Amino acid sequence: KKRVYLFGDKKADGNSTMKNLLGGKGANLAEMSAIGIPVPPGFTITTEVCTEYNALGKDSVINALKEDVQAAIESLEQTMGTKFGDAENPLLISVRSGARVSMPGMMDTVLNLGLNDKAVLGLVKRTKNERFAWDSYRRFIQMYGGVVLGMKPKTKQDIDPFEEIMEHLKDKRNIELDTEFTVQDLRDLVYDFKDAVKKQTGHDFPTDPWDQLWGAVMAVFNSWNGDRAVYYRNMHGYPADWGTAVNVQAMVFGNMGTNSGTGVCFTRDAGTGENVFNGEYLIDAQGEDVVAGVRTPQQITKLGSKRWAELAKVEEADRAENYPSLEELMPKIYKELNGYQEKLEKHYRDMQDMEFTIQDGKLWILQTRNGKRTGAAMVKIAVDLLKEGLINEKEAILRIEPNKLDELLHPVFDPKALKSAHVIAQGLPASPGAATGKIVFFADEASKFMHSILVRIETSPEDLEGMNIAKGILTARGGMTSHAAVVARGMGKCCVSGAGALKIDYKSRTLKVDGQVYHEGDWISLNGSTGNIIEGKVATIEPELSGEFAEIMKLSDKFRTMEVRTNADSPKDAKVARSFGAQGIGLTRTEHMFFEVDRIKAMREMILADTVNGRKRALKHLLPMQREDFEGIFEAMQGLPVTVRLLDPPLHEFVPHQLSLQKELAEEMHISVDAVKSKVAELAEFNPMLGHRGCRLGNTYPEITEMQARAIIEAALNLKAKGIEAKPEIMVPLIGTMDEFIMQENIIRETANKVFKEKNDTIHYLVGTMIEIPRAALTADKIAQHAEFFSFGTNDLTQMAFGYSRDDAGKFLPIYIEKGILKVDPFEVLDQEGVGQLVEMATERGRNVKPDLKVGICGEHGGEPSSVEFCYRTGMNYVSCSPYRVPIARLAAAQAAI
Ligand code: PEP
Ligand code: MG
């Protein structure tokens, strides 16, 4: 079995199709090398070895690898003209993780490996730069100590032993910055660091480069099962047995003086999708310095530099002198880099995110990958690449991550509200969108408020969980490629970074700007598209959709065969959904029409009525309200089908539990408070979700169904009189037996006929049912003899198939997911294995009886991409989802059909 793959010198054993084996990074390094990009030579140890390591342990893996790795190191030595651990010209290497998908900042890296007391002298000779050599050595011990020897602070409160030594020396020498250390200081640090290692671990720091290498390789394998990686994996649903590859590569140095540097660049704008080459670099720095956000990086292109200066309010003369772009400072290197970015984008046919280093005037490309981007950029780039002929229509659709469209569909700040907004500072527009929330300073406290904004000096991978919870992220340091910016864009979360004017004090939990102090819990708002930081809460409005968005939607409609409807309970929702392309309503929850204050009273009277006559009196009040609602919805849908579901109220949600409200109701109904109380007590159910709801209500109180059927039919006829077509599909909820359905159907049809007679007119309507109880699914063939359509209520079907009460599942589901008992929340992502069987079986049995039976879904899953794909495979006619998810479902349906 081949365990080690070489690359470099414009050759490679692997290529980009081998991501599962070589990891994303390793596969790309191989590919780049093969197409003539100057990557530092190296080799990749496969992901399979990670799995072997987990199964068999260290010794056996080293045995299996030894010969191949020795040969690989020799080949590196030859290409670079250096020697591992040499006192004249040492080979230094980096050791990095690389899973099959990119997991930014999740795993550990060791740089400068191969340094020891001998090799450091070799480095001095080669670079003629003592300071650089000793600084590299002390960085190496620090990194190796942290990553491999476990000398990293475990919590925020713990002190990093190496930082402590450095602080100590700074105090002693009365200096502030790392750059002020003398060569002798750095030498002292190296020895002090080694002492610290001995003291804490009981062993000497390994001086043999081979021991160093094996230690680092094992540490990378271990990091695959570290907390951060496990959290990230779980968040994205990546299985543990993927493992990570290890990439070992010759080091090149960006910190060898003013003719060296390092940077990150994107072939297109990751925020907007605009087709402009852009990025950031630092002169005389190592790669980590750019992303860590410690120094403010400069722009790659002149255009980018000018845009940056405008935002940062830097005068042109100042910019040109102090923050020149790479294009201006090193025009030849820039030209070469520009050539590679064009070549790589054409080669990979997607926007690339590249890392490069300039070592003493020679450009090296360290890495390239498909760049993370915002939802807006994703859409624009796909459409642009299509127009440029780099990809075809189907590929353009497949390039869109349906869930990421969500970002585009959500509200932005109301421009009117923004006019009076007080902008307190400006940062970089790191990840677009609008966020409003209360200030928190610590990632693990992000859930303290319902809406929180995480405010940090800079973020690190440990903050990931909190960043995910917060509505927005604000940092004082860091550029557009800082950890916060990259991660936020990936999450589609609003982020403003590098707002240098902010003085953040973690101790007092305050944020100071221009003499003004803001505390934890104060409201602030972020505009991730402009970088504005705004005091207080700012109102938001619906977003405007771009032309590219419309093009992707049009393209989706061309390929998809399944219809997309919406769940809407009001004319307003119906209109929003239509503007997003809904082709009808798949579910109107009529009980939701009674949540308003003045309506809930009539509803309560109906629920509390003791007699049929009492109930009929209350229903009389409700009838005109319902009719009006239906007219509004039918009108908004202009002849498209509208599925109206009969009342399915969890009754306890409608009765008042507070004494003051009970008193009010008693007065209005002219009954005693005690009577109200005892009725409320009577209605209490142990599990209302499995109680007196759905058709059980309509079958025990037929007058309710009668009223609703009348309201629907009358509304449709009223519209017809006005020349507007209405297509009602009346849906009976929560049936488990055929007879439950028949009884409801009879009431509906009798009532409809009565209304037709009264109005001397008719309309066409359907009577169908929800399939949301397992027994209904099992007996679907019987039910289909009567029902004219099926709509899967997968919320209830999931509840009853799993036996998880919808009301109570929140108590244990998160723990189940954390422990891996469940991979995802089945109320969010349809459980195809279990619940899916019921859906497939019911569809098949139903269509055996009625081949053209219309089948859809209206549970929450109707807007979830993987579930939409399942519905397509099951042969459903449509999915129905909340208005904002309609575009997502349209796209997912197209992807399913491709
Ligand atoms: C369902 O159960 O899936 C459904 C759509 O109905 P509700 O959520 O109103 O119970
Ligand atoms: Mg239901």
Image (tube, helix red, strand yellow):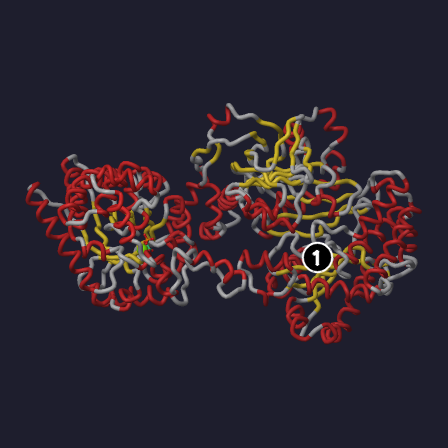
Residue 137: x and y in percent read 85, 53
Q: Where does residue 845 sit, x and y in percent of width and height?
A: 26, 68
Query: Please, is residue 443 above or below residue 807 in the view?
Result: above
Residue 316, given in percent of the width and then of the height, sits at 70, 25
Q: Is residue 734 visible?
A: yes
Instruction: Give residue 63's quadrant in the image.
Output: bottom right
- The residue labelled by disc 1 is 108
Quarter of the figure that contains the C terminus: bottom left
> In the figure, 325 relative to 18: above or below?
above
Secondary structure type for disc 1: loop
Q: Nearer the viewer, residue 436 or 530?
A: 436
Is residue 307 shown left or right of residue 153?
left
**Quadrant in the picture for residue 373:** top right
Compared with residue 194, is residue 182 higher up or lower down, i.e. above or below? Answer: above
Q: Which residue type does callout 1 highlight?
A: Asp
Of residue 421 and residue 400, the one placed in the foreground of this image is 421
Q: Is residue 844 above or below residue 437?
A: below
- Please indicate, yes or no, whether residue 81 appears anywhere in the rendered image: no
Nearer-the-camera pick, 530 or 321? 530
Q: Is residue 466 left or right of residue 898?
A: right
Q: What residue do we see at 55% from left, 61% from top?
A: 238
Numbered circles on residues, count: 1
